[in-house]
Amino acid sequence: MTIRNYEAGDLEACRGLWRQLTEWHREIYQDKTIGGEQPENQFDKHLAAIGPSQIWVAVHESRIIGFVGLIVKEREAEVEPLIVSRAYRGRGVGKRLIEKVIAEARGRGVRYLNVKPVARNVKTIQFLRKQGFANVGFVELFMDFSKGSWKPDLHMYGYDFNT
């Protein structure tokens, strides 16, 4: 497996991976509406916003199996997104992609590097903790007026929260 810069010919593969990520979020939140009818179009918007030079792809036998993006704003940066094909999870692909984006951020003199996994994505949170993301910078709390499907599974600062 190799990690390389995004190229124009990677578009459809990355759009497909974006769809896989959206389907995973739909699954863990039991909500088929997440991402809309064509979630892969969100990759196009993301690519236009951050530029191709801010995306790296993981390639195995000429097939793109994952990618990572880096959004840099002055001395702060965000990992967005981190996607590994379902068939290749647990094989070190995500680790290599995170190592690449960490090295890029360090090389650019970034002071803080953050990543924002969805709260219910426990495996990803555990993975990111193992990669060194140990500081919590902010917590986003919200109300769901649609009565979505939530799990009461987070305890923080003496309170129980739903994810």
Image (spheres, rainbow, N blue to C red):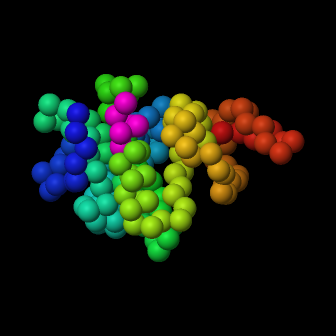
Residue 149 coordinates in the image, percent (x, y): 63, 35
The relative height of residue 124 versus residue 49 in the rendered view (above or below) is above
* Residue 20 lies within the magenta run: no
The relative height of residue 30 versus residue 52 in the rendered view (above or below) is above
Residue 115 coordinates in the image, percent (x, y): 52, 51
Residue 104 coordinates in the image, percent (x, y): 37, 57
Please state, as top left, top right, bottom left or bottom right, where the C terminus lies in the image: top right
Left or right side of 17 for 152: right
**Residue 134 falls in which quadrant of the image?**
top right
> Between 115 and 30, which is closer to the camera in this rendering?
115
**Which region shows up in magenta?**
92-97
Q: At 34% from the left edge and 34% from the top edge, which residue is drawn?
A: 93
> Between 112 and 116, which is closer to the camera in this rendering?
112
Q: Which residue lies furthest to the bottom in this view?
A: 74
Q: Can residue 103 be seen in this view?
A: yes
Residue 54 coordinates in the image, percent (x, y): 31, 60
Looking at the rendered structure, the number of numbered marks drawn on it comes to 0
> Between 146 and 76, which is closer to the camera in this rendering?
76
Magenta stretch, main secondary structure, is helix
